[in-house]
Image: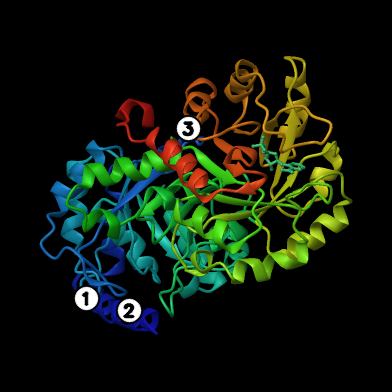
Amino acid sequence: MFLERIVAQTLKDLEQRKQEIPLEEMRRLAMAQAQPRDMLEAFEPRSRVKLIAEVKRASPSKGLLAPNLDPVETAQIYEANGAAVISVLTEPHFFLGSPTFLTAIKGAVSVPVLRKDFIVDEYQVYEARSWGADAILLICAILDDEQLHHLHAVANQLRMRCLVEVHSKEEAQRAVAAGAVIIGVNSRDLVTFQMNPYLLRDIRQLLPNDCVVIAESGIHTAADARRIARSNVQGMLVGESLVVSNDIPGQIQTLLSGANQSTQVKICGLRTPDHINTAVEAGTDMLGFIFHEPSHRYLLPSTLPDLLAASARYQQPTTGAPDLVGVFVNKEAAYINEVAEQAGLHFVQLHGNESPELCQQIKRPVIKAIQFQNLEDLSLAQAYQEVSWRLLLDTPASQWGGTGKTHDWDLARIAAQHFPILLAGGLSPENVLAAIAQVHPWGVDVSSGIETNKQKDSQKIRAFLAQVRSSEARPISLTSLS
Ligand SMILES: O=C(O)c1ccccc1N[C@@H]1O[C@H](COP(=O)(O)O)[C@@H](O)[C@H]1O
């Protein structure tokens, strides 16, 4: 396994460096440094996803990426375009890095600098500080609990922050137990190098809300950035897609605006592989399935896995893989949890008059539909906001939802100023741009408006998504990122 090879090489190199500068001397050099910059502060305000931009010339999974990259110039471009932290590899054999890159970058930027190496020995922590690093990476997969606690403590004594990287639920629990406050979820399998786009969401649910969570690996497109933003992360660590880009400022803008300013789209009421394929191809973020029997869009929950298996585009492991949302009306919590588990749902949408207590019993993040009729309903929404992942505003109706009728967007705008909302009810390719401009929702949700004669219409699905994405093709200002 490549990890073992890197660690073995790291230990070999380390022995050499310890001969040149003994531990006591390295500790003294570390202590003599000026106070480090606080990486935790770089993630304020936590409501926005920040960028940790990585300087690297090569990687074990991809080989040479940018062998001639100028480390300092690249770091300065990153900072000038909104990166909150610069990550630097100093490992020379697999990443073509160097300690001189780190020291030179630290002197050339004003944001915190992270030493992102394979740290297994306290000597490397002192070394990192003596080179100017403000923070270090600790990889759970190469450390036992004792090492993790010890290295974390040494870094803290030096007032450095640690980014503690995890690849599994078990490692996430170990990181939390070690006192980690900044946790990186690396979605790339360390043995196969395969990406698991759903790992982040699964692990995020286990991490305390006050942790800073960083999405790591395979973040290339605006769709990837929107996907990680659905997992309530505070940062994304990006290397490859930046260093190989011939337009680094443009790529940073794509990712930051994808995470912070894009509109999430849910295409709802799907029942056929063709329409699922169309929605995925057109770039939807969420696929919705109606588990409410009276609806003409009803789908028997047990048929969802087969439906997805027959949808080639959903099966293709693209990094922007959409999330699955099951829509329920006034069902028991136990039933909802069972369906969610068996059908592999990522989110549960509760569209009836389910209580806040029931929302709390659901084992998936809840999207709670609210029929928002007047300003007094804002306090009702507040009660649900505490127990749901997102609030959905739909048009009040006796059949609960999917009416094709719009509601008061002025009221919706007021709600959107208080919470991130999913706007539903009567949206269509014709009116969705106006809705976004007026309400500024976190996301939009559509069903009737992409149907013809009560059947989904591929052309309308494409047109709807094209309209939403066209609203995002505008530059963002750097001040709006801070
Ligand atoms: O679509 C349905 O039949 C449905 C039934 C019961 C609860 C919710 C339902 N759909 C939700 O309604 C909105 C879409 O509204 P529209 O059709 O675009 O006006 C969406 O949230 C669906 O999940």
Q: Is residue 235 above or below residue 417?
A: below
Q: Position of residue 482 (x, y in %)?
A: 38, 30
- State the image quarter where residue 339 is shown: bottom right
Relative side of 414 to 73, left or right: right
Q: Is residue 381 above or below residue 70?
A: above
Q: Amino acid at mark 1?
A: His
> Can you identify the residue that label 1 sits on?
93
Q: Earlier in the sequence, mark 2 or mark 3?
A: 2
Q: Amino acid at mark 2?
A: Ile
> Can you identify the residue that label 3 sits on?
45
- State the image quarter where residue 50 is shown: top left
The quadrant in which the N terminus is found is: bottom left
As helix, strand or loop, the secondary structure at mark 3 comes to: loop
Is the residue under label 1 in contact with that under label 3 (CB below 8 Å)?
no
Assign ligand 1 to one image quadrant: top right
Relative side of 77 to 452, left or right: left
Distance between the alpha carbons at the discs numbered 1 and 2: 8 Å
Q: Is residue 179 visible?
A: no
Is the residue under label 3 in contact with that under label 2 (CB below 8 Å)?
no
Q: Earlier in the sequence, mark 3 or mark 1?
A: 3
> Which is nearer the eye, 361 or 162?
361
Ligand 1 within 8 Å, label 3 CB: no
Q: Earlier in the sequence, mark 1 or mark 2?
A: 2
> Which is nearer the eye, 251 or 289?
289
Q: Residue furthest front?
A: 453
Q: Position of residue 304 (x, y in %)?
A: 69, 64
As helix, strand or loop, the secondary structure at mark 1 comes to: loop
Relative side of 298 to 163, left or right: right
